[in-house]
Image: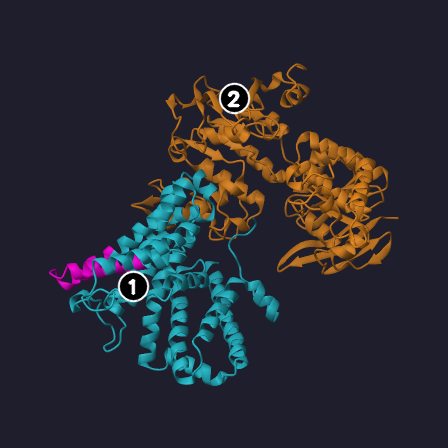
Amino acid sequence: MYAIRMENITKRFGNVVANDNVSFAAAPGEIHCLLGENGAGKSTLMRILFGLYRQDSGSIYINDNPVTISGPRDAISLGIGMVHQHFMLAEQLTVTENIVAGCEPRKNGLLDYEKARQDILEVSERYGLRVDPDAKVEDISVGQQQRVEIIKALMRGAEVLILDEPTAVLTPPEVSELFTVMRALSESGTTIIFITHKLKETMEISHSVTVLRDGKKVGTVSTEDATPESLVEMMVGRSLPVHDDCRMPPREAIALELKDISVSGRKGSRARLDNVNLDVRFGEILGIAGVDGNGQLELEEVVCGLRRPSKGRIIMSGQDLTGLDTRRIRDKGVAYIPSDRLRRGMVGSLSLSRNSVLGMHHHSYFSQRGVLLEDIIEKHAEEIIKKYDVRAESVHQPMGSLSGGNQQKMVVGRELTRPHSVVIACQPTRGLDVGAAYYIREQILDSRNKGKAVLLISAELDEILELSDRIAIIYEGQVVDVRPTGQFTERELGLLMTGERNGV
Amino acid sequence: MDLERGVSKFAYSVVAVVLALLVGAVLIWASGYDVKEAYSNLFTGAFGGVYSLATTIVMSTPLLFTGLSVAFAFQCGLFNVGAEGQLYVGALTSAVVALALGWLPPVLRVGIALLAGAGAGALLGFVPGYLKAKLGAHEVITTIMLNYVATFLTTFLVKTYFKDPGPVDQTVLLPMGSRLPELIRGTRVSLGIVLGIVAVALLNHVMRRSVLGYEIQVVGQNPHAAEYGGVNVSARTVQAMMISGAVAGLAGSVEVMGTLYRFIPYFSPGYGFTGIAVAVIAGQNLWAVIPAAILFGALQSGGQTMQLFAGIPMELMTMVQGLVILFVAAPTLGRLLFGLKMRVREGGGRK
């Protein structure tokens, strides 16, 4: 018997076939990974199951009974719950109020808050879903908000729980906590469908894996029989070789140097950056490892002139850049891939061609006497699209209409085509699928191999380990250690990142 | 892509106007008037014959400028509610300059007076722009406040310094050589409408082709990305407000030099505010300001005829104007009320 079975599901959006005759089944208590690149059709399939879309053809069975699901309400009553990537919580309300909204326990026509609270605590204890029922949602961390969403689904009687990219927003410790919860749920018989594109997590948590590619099902395998390599091949349709490592040795000359950089926090709180000293040589990648929120954003913004340091100096190739504005600093030869692509790196409503020159539109190559040279800009955008394999219809389409991976390729392409000697790459592959991430890492290595200095800031330890020549660990705004990559063990890195200096 | 989007947006606006007229018909009927008589008068009053057309153009001209002013500010993410005040300072400045320069040849005189009006508007636009850029003061608040300052200041100046010796608080009539030339003899259609269209073309060109326009767009759509791209956000904000102010100032100049031939306190029936409506309807497309301004001018001039010959109160047409804005600004409302599937594609994409 299967808890859930979807047979020959097809779904079209206009000319695009999002799901092409896809079948999928999960047994009770199974943790089933739905793996595939962005746009492979994973979310569409699950949205059909949750009643957000209606399939064009195909059928759905729950416990072997055929069902029609015409909306989330139907799905919920059939015992299906979904935790979306973007949470649907009212920030101003408490955890309890959010969880019971829509199915409130009542006493005399009023909300029985005490009962609601008790119910939540019970569920929370049973599965190790730690939450404070009285906290306001706006005051709790993203990881806690996710737990609130999971409790919400469970309290509505979910026996099948769909988690849409749940780890994308979590810190490493939160991920392992989520996995503990998932195991507990699975043991008590809840079926979990885990949408992801991360191989490591798939291997760690799932019982079986279904891989989708371009809207079609590639296959279902038991996790025991799978290897990361075999899964990549299923996802991407080819194997990804290990990054080529032919390169020039790093030069002695220092490209970028930070001297005693501090950024003060709000009044009374500790400094965001505290006496940071770093140097990056030409032809090397210096990786900044650390748990998100330990000063990475401040570091990125200070180096690129978006934020003034309260103390210290920034020196590039011997020139003091401290206090210069972003335009001047970048014109000295800084390519900057910002950590927040949507907020910083692009203007979603403007065309690809307009976005392809952001930050260099004033260069005499792209504009003269204050007038943009349209033809040259369009050609430039076309070149980026071609060279960096951006999937786009035309240079005139708004950048916001591209998928995340293609947006990032566009940003990376733009930055690496500007004249530069230093690359500041911040969370360069965040939220990207394996293929796109691989490609972008390749470009960063290529930059290094051409003798550029790269400062790589990433919350993904694997990425840091794979790319960096040296690693600096940042914790609470301080650089706690810098060593060549080979001289750290993973355990040491983990301890240092969480502030356990003495354990090393 | 751009063109397609423009067309569908335009088609949607047409639908909104039709919807507004339909709801307006119900209101006219419910108020006990004859719908057919009302609308035939509205149409003849707006477009039936040279005189009607002329009136429509005269009524549209200031709206063309104020609408352009507000629409331009929108592109920089700024909401200029101060077009009304900028219009008054532009109007008085142009009147005073045109009167003072009587010794210059007419072409120069008119040109300088127009520039002076634009300059005065720009100056008044500078204030909220600067306050926003340096202190973060919201431009909606500051421009609303400055409207009072401008309206009362110009009235005070006229009463105290520039008053016509007669009993009415107004400046003396501009001599022939200080006026904008008539386009159609015997009507008050002046060169103003042409200047308005030229202004639209010019600003459209600036937005689409120039570095300044590009940077203004980036600041308007995503100030964080602008910072990242090395754009001086403060400077662009101030400049956009000044340009917007200059255009609104010209609305006043053109009205004084082409239609009224003198400055009269409180002469504007709210051109600055109707300009906001015009800009909302035009959306992100500056060219669309032209039909939008003509639409409102037509409702105004047709409404007058309707009131005069059919005895239907002008206020009903003001209501139709309101409905147009409602339907354009709230596509979902139109869909809900009429079950129409109207797709308005927006450029924003995923947020």
> Residue A201: which quarter of the image?
top right
Q: Position of residue A57 (x, y in %)?
A: 74, 60
Mark 1: few/some/many CA within 10 Å (<14, 14-19, 20+):
many
| Magenta range | B88-116
Residue that label 2 marks: A274
Query: Which chain corresponds to the colour orange?
Result: A
Q: Residue A202's spot in the image, x, y percent?
A: 73, 36
Q: Is residue A96 left or right of residue A278?
A: right
**Residue A34 visible in this rendered orientation of the protein:** no
The overriding secondary structure of the stretch rendered in magenta is helix
**Chain letter for the part of the structure drawn in cyan:** B
The chain to which mark 1 is attached is: B
Of the residues shown, which amino acid type is indicated by label 1? Pro
In the foreground, A109 or A80: A109
* Residue at x-position 31% and y-position 62%: B251
Q: Quadrant of residue A118?
A: top right
Q: Residue farthest to the left?
A: B103
Residue B129: x and y, percent?
A: 37, 47
Q: Nearer the viewer, residue A456 or A386?
A: A456
Q: Residues within 10 Å of mark 2 (few under 14, many from 20)?
A: many
Q: Magenta span has A233? A: no
Residue, far front? B167
Foreground: B201 or A366? Answer: B201
Tell me the residue that label 1 is attached to. B265
**Quadrant position of the C terminus of chain A in the picture:** top right
Could you tell me residue B50's position as x and y percent? 31, 80
